[in-house]
Image (tube, rainbow, N blue to C red):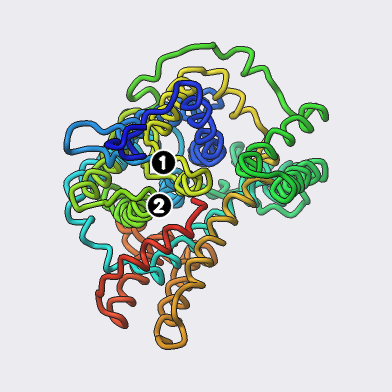
Amino acid sequence: MSQNVHPVDEVLPAGKLSALGLQHVLVMYAGAVAVPLIVGRALKLSPEQVAMLISADLFCCGIVTLIQSLGATQWFGIKLPVMMGVTFASVAPMVAMANSNPGPQGAGLIFGAIIGAGVVSILIAPVISRMLRFFPPVVTGTIIAVIGISLMRVGINWIFGNPFGPTAPSIPSPEHLAWLDAAKQAAGAGAIPPVPAGLNLVGTVPNPLYAQLPHIGIAAIVLVSILLIAKYAKGFVANISVLLGIIVGGVVATAAGLMDFARVAKAGWFDLVLPFEIATPVFDPILILTMTLVMIVVMIESTGMFLALGDMTSKKVDQKMLTAGLRTDGLGTLIGGIFNTFPYTSFSQNVGLVGVTGVKSRFVCVAGGAILILLGLVPKMAALVESLPTFVLGGAGLVMFGMVAATGIRILASVDYQKNRNNLFIVAISIGFGMIPLIAPKFLQWMPHNIHPLIESGILLASVSAVLLNVYFNGSRQDDAAAIQAAKQADAH
């Protein structure tokens, strides 16, 4: 390497570059495909459409990674070893939108909100780069903990089944359903008063589809596999324990006859990812505002990541670089909405991998981005991921989403509670606000419907609470060192 070339700008030999790039892809792969699976199934899209979401997501991950690590003009790209992926912070608001408006119509609302938030994020990036003082570790740790706790519900429902719908714990008694059908026929003949509109029977009979023991067993095998690999494997293999656990679960499910490959066989080997394939965006101002608030939180987290990465690579991150990196978060989100995917941010697992391997070259992530683009163009890969039974993913989801919560707790552990007891109030009250939509999901039923998207996300409630309480108790002192230390600890997204 030339004395004049910084390690970040070093171009490694092609073979080493490809191997290290693939390593970055494998570390982030499980997290990258989790979001399209969650949102696609919440929207009740067809399996083929969910597979399209996965392909588009991987494709956009690659495109945005290239822009961030390689750079595109002076306006976009921090030019550090950064892998970009879908942020889990956006999942709860998107699932809420999907539950209110399932199908392509809801997808259009989500993608419109993402495009709008992407445009706003590009415009406000210079301002956000100066807002780190409002997000010290006590705030970011609380937000990340609430994100993880909120997502745990998804992983648990993947294992057992959903509390509503065909895999709910209970179903209406067949005898009661037969009586209701007879009553409807009698009402049609005029023998009895008409059946009231919207009359439904409450589930009272245990549902054989809920919490099936074979499903729980395979989820347990996935979890145990991840734990064994994490403990006894070393280096890179340990870093991809979640992905390997999912593979083990898929093999066991296949051997048990619980995994169907029909859609994989039908899927092609190559297909282009095109804009607006699933839905045409619909622009709702309230939903755009909701997603913009999510992006502000995401960009603040990215700020800490970029500062930590600059510290790890000995590359000083100045205001211009920071703004270019955050602007790329917005551009990536805009690209994601256009290609019918999701908001993008730097993946903290991969930032941690830079510290573990000591390889600082940004061209490793350029290679990783190219690999992601290729994976996005292979529909069979997306169909294979979509075909995985949810109980297989549930075993891994407990780890992935639980690690997010644990990361928040680890950041909070570095907060000073002895000299500043007010930090306890910030954490306690903000987590309480974050739990409201989980514990009392109908709390907003008498509030104006237009503001529901703003308040039905526990992550947004916790974020606003933590920021306001921190300003109230602690003011707005900037502490870059604390932010860098917190970002280094956040090795799970």
Q: Quadrant of residue 429?
A: bottom left
Mark 2 crowd level (few <14, some 14–19, many ≥20, 10 Å Cα):
some
Instruction: Give x and y (percent) for residue 369.
Output: 41, 29
Q: Are marks 2 and 1 in contact (CB under 8 Å)?
A: yes
- Of the residues shown, which amino acid type is indicated by label 2? Met
Q: Quadrant of residue 329?
A: top left
- Residue at the (52%, 43%) spot, across then down: 357
406 or 335, which lies in front?
Answer: 406
- Is residue 475 positioned above or below 449 on the image? below
Instruction: Give x and y (percent) for residue 345.
Output: 37, 44
SS at circle 2: helix
Q: Which residue is mark 1?
A: 360
* Residue 312 numbered tag: 2
Mark 1 crowd level (few <14, some 14–19, many ≥20, 10 Å Cα):
many
Q: Quadrant of residue 166?
A: top right
* Mark earlier in primary sequence (2, 1): 2
- Residue at the (53%, 23%) spot, across then down: 48
* Residue 225 numbered tag: none
- Residue at the (42%, 58%) spot, across then down: 487
The residue positioned farthest toward the front in the image shown: 3
Instruction: Give x and y (percent) for residue 405.
Output: 54, 60
Q: Is residue 468 left or right of residue 151?
A: left
